[in-house]
Image (cartoon, helix red, strand yellow):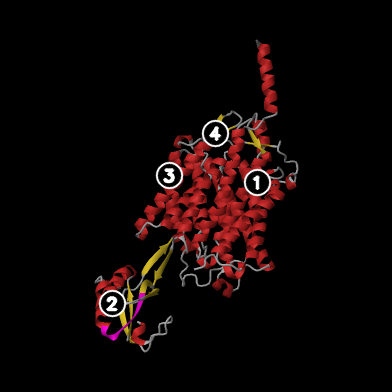
C-alpha cells in the first residue's frame, strides 16, 4: 500500500478529485496549507508599508491506495493539477504499513 | 398708519425677546447628533479595528466604545461648562457644572440673529464631538497601550486640551448682541481666543482633527514602536470591516458637518454638498495617485482617501463653494497619501493607523484652505459681518493668517498637553503592556476574550 501526498494549486482541487475518482481512488483527505517553493511569494502594500508574503496558500491532498494503483494515481494528479506554470506543486509517495477501518476493524487493503 | 407700524414693531420686539426654537432645526440637530454617534460607534471603531491584527481587534473596538462612554459622562458633568461658558479667552467657567441651569427651556444661539435651538440639543451634539476627538487618538498607539493608561490619558487630555481648544475656537455669545461696532467689540472680547482672532473652523478642523492628530503623534513617539515593527508583518486583518467603517464615517459626517450649522437651512445643505463632493474627490485623487506611484489602486487607499477628504473639508464645509470643496478634496487625497508614506518615514514614529498622516495633514490643509476658498471670488460664502448684516469685505491674506493662528495654537497646545498627560500616565500606571502580552495580543491579555473563533 502507498500513501500519496500531493501539494497542488487550490483552484485545481476539484479537477484532481474527479481525476482520482475516475481511476478508482476511494477517498482523499484535503488540508489547506501554506508554503514556499520556487514560485516564491508576492508583495502586499498597505498605505506606506510593504510586506513580502513568503508563504502562498496551497492545498494538500492525501490518498491511501493499493500499490497497483500508484502509477495511475500519480498520472491522474499530474495531469489534473498541471497548468504548466511555476507553482503547480509536488507529489510525494510513501510506503504505507497498515490501514484500519475504525467502524469494522478491517485492516490492510480491505480497509482502503 | 404710523401707529400700526409701531405696534407691529413692538410685537416683533416682544417675539424676538422670547424666541421659540424652530421644530425643524431642533429635529435636525437631534438627527445630526445621532449621525455623529454612528461615526464613532461603530464607524470609527470598525475603521480602526479592521486595520489592526486579528489579535488586537477587540482592544481597539473596546477603546473606542469606552472612550465614547467616558467622555459622554465627563461632558455633561463639567466638559460643556468649561467649553461653552464665558470666563477667559482660553477656557470657560463652572457656571454650568453638572449642567446646572440648563433646562428644556434654555436656548443656544445659532449663526442667525433671532434663531435659537434648545440648549440641550447643543449640549448633546457637542458631546459627540468631544467623544470622537478623544477616540480618534487611539489609532496612533493601537496594539500596545495599556487599557488603564488609555482611559487615564483620555480623561486628562480631554480636560486640558479638548476643552480649551473647543472654547478658544467656538465660544461666543451669539449674533444677537452684535448690533453695532461697539457691541461687536464686546462680543469679541468675551469670545474664545481663536474666535476673536477670526479663525474659521466650521465643524472642527482644528478642535477635532489637528488636536487629536498631535496627541496621537506625540503618543506614538513616547510609547515607542510596536514589537517587531518594520520586521514582522502587521497587515490589516479585515479591510472589509475597514471599508464598512469608512462608509459609516462618511454617512455620519453629514451630521457632523451639516449639523455644525445648527440650523436646517441652505447653509446646512451647502455643508452637505461640500462633504459629499470633497470626500468623493479625495477618494479619487488618493486612488489615482496610488495607482500611478504604487502600481495598484487599493480598497484601503480609497477608504483612506475618503477619510482624508472628510477631514480636510470639515473646517471649510460651511464656507466654501462646491468647486472649492472639490479642489480641497483632490489636494487632500494626494497630500495625505504622502502623509502616510514619505512624511511618515521622515517622522519615524510608529503611528499605527496613521492618525497624524490623515487627520493631521488633512486637518492642517483644510484649515488653511478654508481661508482661501471662503473667498467670494472663489465661490465661497465670504465672512459674514453681523454689524452690517451682510457679507463683509474679504481679505485673503488676513484670513489665511487667522487660519494659521488656529493651526499653530492647535499644534502647539495639543502637543504640549499631550506630552505632559502621557508622562503623568506613565508615572501613575505605565503606558505599555509587557512585551509578552503585546505578542499574545491585547484581546486576550487585556480583555480576556477573542474577536474570532476559527
In three-dimensional space, the C-alpha distance between marks 3 and 2, rounded to whole angstroms, equals 67 Å
Contact, mark 4 vs mark 1 (Cβ under 8 Å): no
Q: Position of residue B309 (x, y in %)?
A: 47, 49
Q: Residues within 10 Å of mark 2 (few under 14, many from 20)?
A: few
- Magenta region: A60-68
In three-dimensional space, the C-alpha distance between marks 4 and 3, rounded to whole angstroms, equals 24 Å
In three-dimensional space, the C-alpha distance between marks 4 and 1, rounded to whole angstroms, equals 25 Å
Drawn side of residue B129 relative to residue A25, left or right: right
Contact, mark 4 vs mark 2 (Cβ under 8 Å): no
Dot 2: element: loop
In three-dimensional space, the C-alpha distance between marks 4 and 2, rounded to whole angstroms, equals 76 Å
Q: Which mark is residue B167?
A: 1
**Chief secondary structure of the magenta portion:** strand
In three-dimensional space, the C-alpha distance between marks 1 and 3, rounded to whole angstroms, equals 30 Å
Identify the mark nearer the N-term, 4 or 3. 4
Residue at image mark 2 = A24
Amino acid at each position: 500500500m502507498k500513501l500519496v501526498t500531493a501539494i497542488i494549486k487550490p483552484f485545481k482541487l476539484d479537477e484532481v478529485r474527479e481525476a482520482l475518482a475516475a481511476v478508482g481512488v476511494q477517498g482523499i483527505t484535503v488540508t489547506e496549507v501554506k508554503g514556499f517553493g520556487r514560485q516564491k511569494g508576492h508583495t502586499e502594500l498597505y498605505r506606506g508599508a510593504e510586506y513580502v508574503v513568503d508563504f502562498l496558500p496551497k492545498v494538500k491532498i492525501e490518498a491511501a491506495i493499493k500499490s497497483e494503483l500508484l502509477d495511475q494515481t500519480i498520472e491522474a494528479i499530474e495531469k489534473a493539477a498541471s497548468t504548466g506554470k511555476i507553482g503547480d506543486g509536488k507529489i510525494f509517495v510513501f510506503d504505507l504499513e497498515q490501514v484500519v477501518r475504525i467502524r469494522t476493524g478491517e485492516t490492510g487493503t480491505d480497509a482502503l | 398708519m404710523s401707529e400700526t407700524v409701531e405696534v407691529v414693531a413692538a410685537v416683533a420686539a416682544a417675539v424676538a425677546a422670547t424666541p421659540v426654537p424652530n421644530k425643524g432645526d431642533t429635529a435636525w440637530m437631534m438627527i445630526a447628533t445621532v449621525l455623529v454617534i454612528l461615526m464613532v460607534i461603530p464607524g470609527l471603531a470598525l475603521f480602526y479595528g479592521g486595520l489592526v491584527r486579528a489579535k488586537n481587534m477587540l482592544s481597539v473596538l473596546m477603546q473606542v466604545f469606552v472612550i465614547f462612554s467616558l467622555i459622554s459622562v465627563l461632558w455633561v458633568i463639567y466638559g460643556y461648562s468649561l467649553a461653552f461658558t464665558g470666563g477667559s479667552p482660553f477656557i470657560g467657567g463652572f457656571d454650568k457644572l453638572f449642567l446646572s441651569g440648563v433646562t428644556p427651556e434654555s436656548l443656544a444661539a445659532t449663526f442667525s440673529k433671532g434663531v435659537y435651538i434648545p440648549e440641550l440639543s447643543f449640549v448633546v451634539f457637542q458631546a459627540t464631538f468631544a467623544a470622537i476627538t478623544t477616540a480618534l487618538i487611539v489609532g496612533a498607539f493601537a496594539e500596545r497601550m495599556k487599557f488603564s493608561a488609555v482611559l487615564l490619558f483620555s480623561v486628562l487630555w480631554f480636560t486640558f486640551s479638548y476643552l480649551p481648544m473647543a472654547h478658544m475656537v467656538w465660544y461666543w455669545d451669539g449674533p444677537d448682541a452684535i448690533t453695532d461696532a461697539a457691541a461687536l467689540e464686546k462680543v469679541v472680547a468675551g469670545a474664545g481666543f481663536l474666535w476673536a482672532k477670526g479663525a474659521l473652523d466650521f465643524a472642527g478642523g482644528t478642535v477635532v482633527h489637528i488636536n487629536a492628530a498631535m496627541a496621537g503623534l506625540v503618543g506614538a513617539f513616547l510609547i515607542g514602536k510596536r514589537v517587531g515593527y518594520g520586521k514582522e508583518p502587521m497587515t490589516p486583518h479585515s479591510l472589509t470591516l475597514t471599508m464598512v467603517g469608512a462608509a459609516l464615517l462618511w454617512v455620519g459626517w453629514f451630521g457632523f458637518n451639516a449639523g455644525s450649522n445648527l440650523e436646517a437651512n441652505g447653509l446646512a445643505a451647502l455643508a452637505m454638498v461640500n462633504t459629499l463632493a470633497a470626500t468623493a474627490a479625495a477618494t479619487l485623487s488618493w486612488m489615482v495617485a496610488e495607482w500611478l506611484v504604487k502600481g495598484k489602486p487599493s480598497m484601503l487607499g480609497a477608504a483612506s482617501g475618503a477619510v482624508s477628504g472628510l477631514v480636510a473639508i470639515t473646517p471649510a464645509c460651511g464656507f466654501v463653494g462646491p468647486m472649492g470643496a472639490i479642489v480641497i478634496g483632490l489636494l487632500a487625497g494626494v497630500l495625505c497619501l504622502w502623509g502616510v508614506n514619505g512624511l511618515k518615514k521622515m517622522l519615524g514614529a510608529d503611528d499605527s493607523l496613521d492618525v497624524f498622516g490623515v487627520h493631521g495633514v488633512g486637518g492642517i490643509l483644510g484649515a488653511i484652505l478654508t481661508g482661501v476658498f471662503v473667498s467670494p471670488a472663489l465661490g465661497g460664502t465670504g465672512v459674514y459681518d453681523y454689524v452690517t448684516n451682510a457679507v463683509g469685505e474679504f481679505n485673503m491674506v488676513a484670513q489665511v493668517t487667522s487660519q494659521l493662528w488656529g493651526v499653530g495654537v492647535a499644534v502647539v497646545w495639543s502637543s504640549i498637553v499631550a506630552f505632559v498627560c502621557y508622562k503623568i500616565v506613565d508615572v501613575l500606571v505605565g503606558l505599555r503592556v509587557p512585551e509578552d502580552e503585546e505578542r499574545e495580543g491585547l484581546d486576550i491579555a487585556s480583555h480576556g476574550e477573542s474577536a474570532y473563533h476559527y
